Amino acid sequence: MKLLLIDDEVITRRGLLGSIDWKSLQIHQVLEAEDGLQGLELARKHSPEIVMTDIRMPRMDGISFADRLRSFLPNTSIIFMSGYSDKDYLRAAIRLKAVSYVEKPINHEEVVRAVTEAVRFHEMMERNQYSEYLRHQEKASQLTLALTRPIGTNQEQIMELIRELKLPFSAGTCFCVFLLTTLPAFGSAEDDGLDAALAQLRKFCQGRGCDCISALKYDSSIVICLFGDAIKDRSFVARLADSLREQLTPLCSLFLATGPSVTGVSRIYESYNQAAVLMQGSFFCDYNSILTEQDASAADNGYIEQSYTRFHELISRRDSEGASQIATSLFTYLRKSRSLLASAVKDLYFKLFISMEDAYRVQLISCQESPAPVWDRILSCNTLKELHEMLMAELLQLSTAAANSMQESGPVSLMKEYIFKNYADPGLSVKSISEYACLSVAYACTVFKSETGKTLNQYLTEYRMEKARQLLQDPRIRVADISARIGYLDGGYFSKSFKKVTGLTPTDYREKLMA
């Protein structure tokens, strides 16, 4: 804490400064002034938590100083010092809510007691203010969330909260709702930075005659309700959105949807609802975008299906360049359309990934093992751009693997051929595969691993899972029958193996394909 010491007697000031262990009293800075005028100047500049002032001083006495101080630092604790124990001074000290009154000549123990009392008083006041701030924030959060629903049965609650918060809402008040999503989500990002950005937004608003309240919704989005006459100006709203984005982008990625400006409390839900609709389209935008209007056209399912079919045909013929062009055209179309839900687009890309993996595995081409099942990787994508870049990277990887497969040795090709012909045999083993290539088990395993990067058992399991994926595309074949068709006598073990490779159970996988 900072303490301002005001006394026109230099000896008194020096005596107090040199004889008291201020740090032990939680005072880390002591400022000096010789009269009330100089004291006011220092108080405005440094905002001390405690002031010790003499009462009788030239130019401006302590009572006049304290009266002026209260106008801009109402919570600062004041300790008066005086050699005159007159009732008028004591009454003035009480009126100005002085914490203590120390008589001259100064007794250092009395000063220590008075400062200790002032420190405790200030800490208690800060705790009370913080508790009041938290109560205010909680009520503001409750009101914000209530306003994201149509006013009906909760109208009485809304009006009561507006009264408690003393908000200047009227029939002509203009409102606008911002919906903010951060990545990582609020709670795992820099929460202090987010709080500071929201505080800065409010300060920016208040400087222009408007204000805002906010709340966390569903642990994923922050709802910000702006209100005031300035909100009618959409260029001002745009500046607010830009300011908030500028504050947050050094800390996290984000999407910010801005609803339209509306008049009246009952219409706030309209602004929120349109912001929520815009946020659904964030999947099609780049990170740190401000979403202001819905610009979507109906998706042509025929074009999408035709693109998927063409992609599958090209990739089956090892035409990676042609498949890449189709995928890029599809990406451009989807991003422009924006009419599909993100889940539907992810299902489509899932089919593209599976089509690509099917074609290459059927052709006995191995590729680098992915760190996670394809569906898990698809779910981790927050934007269409991320999803498309992942597809293109894997397409390039598989294209390279196809070129490398042309250089495989004869023994490896023989072992793959034997697996291709006998994968449905439950008795297929590393030993029988090795014998077909006329190699010992140990040497066969070494050669296969060195050329493909996978063990024979890994390759056999993945090949069987690939065949299972193909069979799951036909809804007429039961999951139990598929297990037997690919060499698994134990259906439970097959399901467990399938989920380990794909991230989905056979039933869930089929549902995704049929979606």
Image (spheres, rainbow, N blue to C red):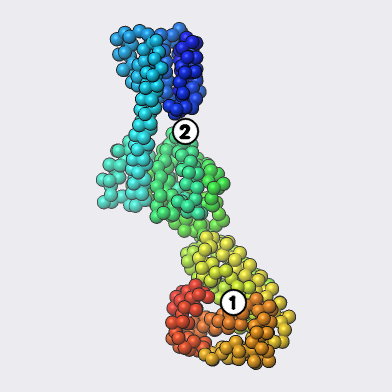
Q: Quadrant of residue 108?
A: top left
Q: Position of residue 148 (x, y in %)?
A: 37, 51
The residue positioned 31% from the left and 40% from the top of the image is 162
Q: Position of residue 343 (x, y in %)?
A: 47, 66
Q: Residues within 10 Å of mark 1 (few under 14, many from 20)?
A: many
Which of the marked residues, 1 or 2, is nearer the chain's N terminus?
2
Q: Residues within 10 Å of mark 2 (few under 14, many from 20)?
A: few
Callout 1 secondary element: helix
The residue positioned 59% from the left and 71% from the top of the image is 370
Locate residue 120 relative to residue 333 in the image: left or right. Answer: left
| Count of numbered labels shown in the rendering | 2
Q: Real-space Cα distance between discs 1 and 2?
A: 58 Å
Looking at the rendered structure, which numbered label has been put on residue 144?
none
The residue positioned 72% from the left and 87% from the top of the image is 410
Looking at the rendered structure, which numbered label has been put on residue 207?
2
The residue positioned 58% from the left and 91% from the top of the image is 422
Q: Is residue 319 visible?
A: no
Q: Looking at this view, is 433 or 138 the one in front?
A: 433
Q: Position of residue 141 (x, y in %)?
A: 36, 45
Residue type beneath disc 2: Gly
Q: Looking at this view, is 299 or 478 the one in front?
A: 478
Instruction: Say which of marks 1 and 2 sits in front.
Output: 1
Locate residue 328 relative to residue 134 in the image: left or right. Answer: right
Residue type beneath disc 1: Glu
What residue is shown with label 1? 357
Locate residue 363 relative to residue 51 in the image: left or right. Answer: right
Q: Looking at this view, is 235 or 327 the one in front?
A: 327
Q: Position of residue 292 (x, y in %)?
A: 50, 51
